[in-house]
Image: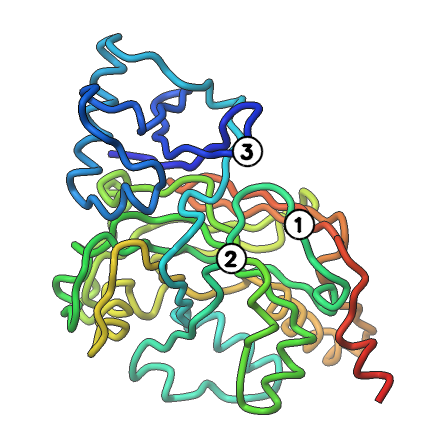
Amino acid sequence: MVKFVTVQKPGQEGTFPGIVVDSFVLDLTQSLNSGKHSPSTMLEWIQLGEEGVDHARKMEVLFREGKIDPTLPLETAKFKAPLPNPVTLRDAYAFENHVKAGRASRGLAMIPEFYQFPVFYYSNPLAIFGPGKIPVQKDHLWDLDFELEAAVVIGKRGKNISSEKADSWIFGYMIMNDFSTRGLQRQEMKLNLGPAKGKDFATAFGPYLVTPDELSSFLVEENGFNKGSRYNLVMKAFHNGKQVSEGNLKDMTFTFAEIIERASYGTELHPGEVIGSGTVGTGCFLELNGTAQAKAKREGRKFEPTWLKNGDEICLEITGLGRLSNTIELVSDYSLLDILDKF
């Protein structure tokens, strides 16, 4: 049972991979013996596979026996994304209630193809953030949204992985916020491409990367038609301290195992690749605004949509995975939209 983290070194720019034990963080680069080199990043630890997890467990035992000292108290640790440099980043579309609500708000029936197989797209693995500030430019504030998701990290290589076996490829689980600028997304997807610039500027992970055994008490019984593990993990979102969303990871129409089966068809997966669940039902303003707007229209009321603005705080919580808090920070007034307006 391990919670992996990446933590900034006190008073320095560098980071170190660590584990959380009780109210402390242990630096994983403290080798078990002085003659052995330890990987210096979380990606390198994940690439060790079971050897890396076993090392972390042994460090916890040594700490509890008083043979090694803690690196930092938990309350003083500055967390980064647990995996700051994923090999790739895929995001799925796995919650029926999210898809159905979004389509219903636009007066559309549920698309039957959704139930045939899990679909995903690739996002930007080079724009990863942990807890803290999310820097945005002017155009990103054009209907800026959050997305409440969980994600898995692949722990070993594999190709054509069956859904019956795919859970053993999961190194760990973490919270994921797929920040989205709906204005740019709408603009590009009219051309049947995207989401591209609508989502390539910021994805947040954290604070922990939790091994599957840590979540074993939340396992849900098999339902007779899904393959792979499902977990009873409550998912919540808070906007400036006010709860705006609640769902559950067990409500995924497709499990992560089934998504991995699809993703690995004809393609080798590698340690350190990340796959997001997609947005849980009620897990973004796009869906919440659409539902509320449809209700207001039926009742003859005006409606003002809610979007993230400069200075806003958005916090995501998932049972067993922690709390991921981010604040929106406008860092540039440079605008592609202003350039387009000149033509």
- Residue 67 shown left or right of residue 242 in the figure: left
Q: Earlier in the sequence, mark 2 or mark 1?
A: 2
Amino acid carrying label 3: it is Glu
Q: Which residue is mark 3?
A: 13
Front one among 135 and 91 = 135
Give the Cα separation between the discs numbered 3 and 1: 30 Å
Q: x%, y% of residue 139? A: 74, 68
Q: Look at 53% across and 61% down and name the residue there.
A: 178
Q: Look at 79% across and 83% down and name the residue there.
A: 340
Amino acid carrying label 2: it is Leu
Q: x%, y% of residue 128? A: 51, 53
| Number of the front mark, 3 or 2 | 3
Front one among 321 and 159 = 159
SS for dot 3: loop
Q: Which residue is mark 1?
A: 239
Give the Cα separation between the discs numbered 3 and 2: 29 Å
